[in-house]
Image (spheres, helix red, strand yellow):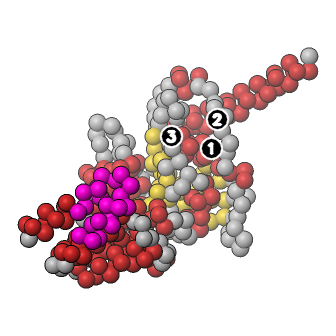
Amino acid sequence: MWVWALRFSLSFWSFFFCAKEVARLVTSWARLGAGVIPLLLLMGGCASYSHQYPTLKSPSGEPRQQELEDTPFHPQAAWQCGPAALATLLEVSGVADADPVDLAAQVYLPGLRGSLQSELLGAARRADRVPYRLEPRLADLLEEIRAGYPVLVLQNLGLSFWPQWHYAVVIGFDMDAEEIILRSGRSPRRVMSFRHFERTWRLGGHWALVIARPGDIPATATASRYVEAVSTLEAQQRREAAIIAYTAAAVRWPTYPLSYLGLGNMAYQKADYEGAEAYFHMVIELSPDEPAAHYNLAWTYLRQGRTSEALGAARQAEALASGNARYTDSVRAISEAARSE
């Protein structure tokens, strides 16, 4: 009998807390002017999830409450929370002409009535900024706020099978009250409980973004993830911004080799072959088994008319290729290029 009573009690409280979540969702839809609440929203169940906020700890000496009150606010037009949130972060990063209307032309997709994350990332790079995706940790998000970076987040204010996607900007928190503060929609200061925010953020894939000017590095950045973000900036031909960012990475993480690989690529593209050679040698010194460094060094030697050294570096790249098709034909590529010069 007591086993049945325990099961009933657990079921009741599970339903009770699920009902509270549904109530919050209804309120969210109403605030955003979503109109009719779908019947499925009211019928949906709640999946179990281990929240992060109960285990949050404030680093020693760091504030338990913080709000970036000077963060600009751009109220969103219909369906255009993406351009509004992006304009906020770009303006904070020093882009003086960041305007939601102009950005909408770059990132808003009428067929979707919204903006994809890839569009926001691309627009940030076109503004010569480094968009950096955070790890899916609430503690990292709060750490960026402490460092002065507002954080752009993707939320799902609906359910996993009936999503209501929404971009907002986190500008503050209160650990004692367990609350998050956002610039959201048409609200310059929307307060959400940690529990409610974490639910909507989780359903949005824990997607969170800070935007840094080249030379500035987010508080929670790691060498590999930051340099990867800069390499995408390089791929979009934002070369001067990439050089500044790679240099900052080399200063922050002097033993991380791929920062120097990026700087070598930048020097090579500017026909500074001596500079490129020096950087590629730095990569090899730190990471002798990196085939990209030997391959790029081979081309750098070739551009300086040092064919024998180029072939030697190409052979080394092939030996380290480990099946990587990009480097398995290094010698042939260098030989053909040498004959054509």
The residue labelled by disc 2 is: 21
Indicate left or right for 90 with 311 as reference: right
Magenta segment: 311-331
Q: CA distance from mark 1 to mark 3?
A: 11 Å
Image quadrant occupied by the N terminus? top right
Q: CA distance from mark 2 to mark 1?
A: 7 Å
- Residue 156, labelled with which disc? 3
Farthest residue to the top: give it: 1
Residue type of the residue flagged with mark 3: Asn
- Residue 101 in the image: state x and y as whole percent: 29, 54
- Residue 56 in the image: state x and y as whole percent: 70, 56
Which residue is at a point 47% across and 36% down the rendered structure image? 164
In the rendered view, would you say 16 is above or below 57? above
Toward which corner of the image does residue 199 lie, by quadrant?
top right
Q: Nearer the viewer, residue 17 or 207?
A: 207
Q: Nearer the viewer, residue 59 or 248?
A: 248
Assess whether residue 305 is covered by the magenta stretch: no
In the rendered view, would you say 127 is above or below 116? below
Mark 2, secondary structure of its residue: helix
Q: How many marks?
A: 3
Image quadrant occupied by the C terminus? bottom left
Give the class, few, some or many, for how many residues have Cα within 10 Å of label 3's Cα (few <14, many ≥20).
Answer: many
Indicate left or right for 156 with 5 as reference: left
Q: Which secondary structure dominates the residues rendered in magenta? A: helix
Circles 2 and 1: CB atoms closer than 8 Å: yes
Circles 2 and 3: CB atoms closer than 8 Å: no
Q: CA distance from mark 2 to mark 3?
A: 13 Å
Indicate left or right for 159 with 99 as reference: right
The residue labelled by disc 1 is: 196
